[in-house]
Image: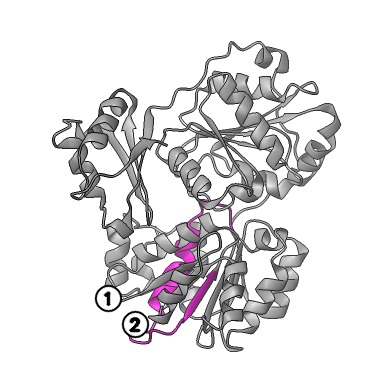
C-alpha cells in the first residue's frame, strides 16, 4: 500500500501529516502530489472529499522559502467558505514548520484589516477572485514572486463569471510559475483556460460521471407541486442526522426551508444573498449538529467541508450530469454508505435521460405513492447553539468558554460540542437538555473576566 513516506517529504511535513492522522494518500494525492512537488503544472479532476486540498497543499508548503515573506503561493477559490477551509487546511499542514504565514483575502468583510495584514508579509494567500483583484487595483498585494498558483474548483469560478478576474490575476503573477488547476467537472472552458495558462500540464482524473460505489441512489417521479411533501417524506423516512437538499434558485431555497420549519424540521437556507454573518451562523449550526437540514443552491454549497453526510436530496434534477455527480458526491465518504435521492416532475424527465446517457445505464426508480404516504416525523437535532458576543479579537479562547460552562455551571464536558471562534463572536454547541442552564450560566457569569452577551443562535 502506498504511504506518504514514499514522497520524500520533510520531517516537519511528516509530523504534520501524522498529527492529522494521514498515513495513506488518496487517489488524487497519489497521482498529483509527485508532480506538485516537482513543480509541474497539473490539471486534475476530482470530486469533493477526494483529498485534493492536501494534494496541492503539501506541495505548496514543502516548496516555500520560509525566510522570504513575499507572497510565494496564491490559491484562488470561488467562495469565502472554500477559501476559509483551504486556509485552515494549509495552516494544519504547515503547523510543524516555523513562521509560515497564510492569509485569507475574501470579500464580505472590511478590506482595511486585510491591507494591514499584508503589510507584514505572507507566504501563501488564499482568496476569492473579486477581493484579490481589489487588492491588485489598490497596489496592496504584490504577486510578482507568486511562483505557485492554484485554481481550486476552477469550473465553479468560471460558472460564477470570474473568468476575466482570474485572467487579470494570473497576468500579475510571474510567467515562469507553476499553475495547478483542480476541478470537479471538465467543461470546454476549463480546457481552454488550461491551454492559455499552463505549460505541458499533467492530466490527472480520479472520478467520472458514475455515482460512487458507496452511494445508494434512488429516483422518484412526483406530481407537480409535490416537492415539499416529498422532501418531508424523505427526511421522515431516513431520519438523517444531517442532510443537504439542493434547489435550483435562491427563492426556492428560502421557500422550501420555510415550509420545512413550519412543519417542525430544523432547516436553514444557504445561498448567495446571505451576508457573511448569516452564512457563518448557518454553517456553524449545520456543522455542529444543531441544524439538521441545509437547503442550498449549487454555488453556495461548493467547498463545504462536511465529513459525514448520510443523505443528499435533489429537490429538482441538476442542470447536467456532472453537477449531479458533484452534488451526490457529498455523501458516502470515508467508507460510510450514503443515500442520494432525486425528485423529478414529468417536465424535468429529459434531465434524467441525459444522466442515463452519460452513465450508460438506467437509474433506479422508487415507489412515489409509497413515499408520499410516509407519516411525517421531523428530525430533531441533538444540539443547540449559543452565540457569544466575543471572539478572537477579544482574546477569547475555546478553553475559556469550556471552562465557564464546566466550572461553576456544572455542565458535563461531554455535553459541550464544537466551539467556533470568529473575530468578534463565538459559537458553542450544547446538548439540548443542557442548553437552558448553559445559557443562564453564561448570562450571569463571566468569560475571560468580562460579561459578554449570550443568546441562542
Quarter containing the N terminus: bottom left
Image: 27 above or below 240: below
Q: Secondary structure at mark 2?
A: loop
Question: For the residues marked 2 and 1, what is the alpha-carbon distance in whole angstroms?
Answer: 8 Å
The local crowd at label 2, few if under 14, some if 14 to 19, many if 20 or more residues have their Cα within 10 Å, is: some
The mark found on residue 66 in the picture is 2
Residue 9 position, x and y percent, is 35, 73
Q: Is residue 47 magenta?
A: yes
Q: Which residue is mark 1?
A: 98
Segment colored magenta: 46-75
From the viewer's perspective, is residue 17 above or below residue 103? above
Task: Give the residue at x 71% y 18%.
Answer: 368
Residue 47 lies left or right of residue 292; in this view the side is right
Residue shown at 58% from the left, 88% from the top: 174
The quarter of the rendered structure image containing the C terminus is top left
Q: Position of residue 190 (x, y in %)?
A: 71, 66
Residue at the extreme left: 408
User: On the picture, is 433 further left or further right than 82?
Assistant: left
Residue 402: image tag: none
- In this rendering, would 315 be left or right of 239? right
- Looking at the picture, tell me which residue is in the foreground, 1 or 300: 300
Asked which secondary structure carries label 1, the reply is: loop
In the rendered view, would you say 427 is above or below 184? above
Q: Mark 2 near mark 1, Cβ–Cβ under 8 Å?
A: yes
Observer-nearest of 360 and 392: 392
Q: Is residue 399 left or right of residue 154?
A: left
In this view, the residue in front, 447 or 192, is 447
In-front residue for pair 33/445: 445
Question: Within the magenta stretch, is there residue 295?
Answer: no
The residue sitting at 18% across, 49% down in the picture is 449
Amino acid at each position: 500500500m502506498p504511504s506518504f513516506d514514499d514522497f520524500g517529504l520533510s520531517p516537519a511535513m511528516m509530523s504534520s501529516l501524522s498529527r492529522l492522522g494521514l498515513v495513506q494518500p488518496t487517489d488524487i494525492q497519489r497521482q498529483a502530489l509527485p508532480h506538485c512537488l516537482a513543480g509541474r503544472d497539473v490539471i486534475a479532476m476530482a470530486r469533493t472529499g477526494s483529498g485534493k486540498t492536501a494534494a496541492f497543499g503539501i506541495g505548496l508548503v514543502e516548496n516555500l522559502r520560509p525566510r522570504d515573506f513575499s507572497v510565494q503561493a496564491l490559491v484562488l477559490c470561488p467562495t469565502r467558505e472554500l477559501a476559509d477551509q483551504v486556509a485552515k487546511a494549509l495552516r494544519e499542514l504547515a503547523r510543524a514548520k516555523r513562521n509560515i504565514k497564510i492569509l485569507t483575502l475574501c470579500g464580505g468583510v472590511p478590506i482595511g484589516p486585510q491591507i494591514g495584514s499584508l503589510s507584514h508579509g505572507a507566504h501563501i494567500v488564499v482568496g476569492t477572485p473579486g477581493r484579490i483583484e481589489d487588492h491588485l487595483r489598490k497596489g496592496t498585494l504584490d504577486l510578482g514572486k507568486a511562483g505557485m498558483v492554484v485554481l481550486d474548483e476552477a469550473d465553479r469560478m468560471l460558472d460564477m463569471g470570474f473568468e476575466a478576474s482570474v485572467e487579470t490575476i494570473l497576468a500579475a503573477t510571474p510567467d515562469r510559475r507553476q499553475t495547478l488547476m483542480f476541478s470537479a467537472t471538465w467543461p470546454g472552458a476549463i480546457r481552454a483556460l488550461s491551454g492559455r495558462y499552463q505549460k505541458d500540464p499533467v492530466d490527472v482524473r480520479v472520478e467520472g460521471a458514475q455515482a460512487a460505489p458507496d452511494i445508494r441512489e434512488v429516483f422518484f417521479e412526483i406530481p407537480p407541486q409535490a416537492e415539499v411533501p416529498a422532501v418531508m417524506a424523505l427526511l421522515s423516512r431516513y431520519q438523517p442526522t444531517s442532510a443537504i437538499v439542493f434547489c435550483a434558485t435562491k427563492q426556492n431555497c428560502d421557500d422550501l426551508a420555510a415550509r420545512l420549519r413550519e412543519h417542525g424540521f430544523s432547516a436553514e437556507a444557504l445561498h448567495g444573498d446571505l451576508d457573511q454573518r448569516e452564512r457563518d451562523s448557518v454553517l456553524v449550526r449545520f456543522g455542529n449538529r444543531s441544524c439538521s437540514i441545509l437547503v442550498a443552491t449549487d454555488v453556495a454549497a461548493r467547498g463545504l467541508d462536511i465529513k459525514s453526510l448520510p443523505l443528499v436530496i435533489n429537490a429538482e434534477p441538476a442542470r447536467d450530469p456532472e453537477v449531479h455527480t458533484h452534488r451526490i458526491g457529498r455523501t458516502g465518504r470515508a467508507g460510510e454508505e450514503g443515500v442520494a435521492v432525486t425528485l423529478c416532475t414529468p417536465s424535468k424527465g429529459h434531465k434524467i435521460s441525459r444522466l442515463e446517457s452519460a452513465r450508460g445505464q438506467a437509474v433506479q426508480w422508487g415507489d412515489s405513492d409509497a413515499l408520499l404516504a410516509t407519516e411525517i416525523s421531523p428530525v430533531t437535532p441533538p444540539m443547540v447553539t449559543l452565540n457569544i458576543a466575543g471572539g478572537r479579537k477579544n482574546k477569547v479562547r475555546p478553553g475559556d468558554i469550556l471552562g465557564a460552562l464546566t466550572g461553576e455551571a456544572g455542565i458535563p464536558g461531554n455535553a459541550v460540542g464544537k466551539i467556533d471562534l470568529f473575530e468578534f463572536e463565538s459559537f458553542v454547541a450544547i446538548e439540548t437538555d443542557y442548553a437552558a442552564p448553559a445559557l443562564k450560566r453564561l448570562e450571569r457569569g463571566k468569560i475571560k473576566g468580562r460579561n459578554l452577551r449570550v443568546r441562542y443562535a
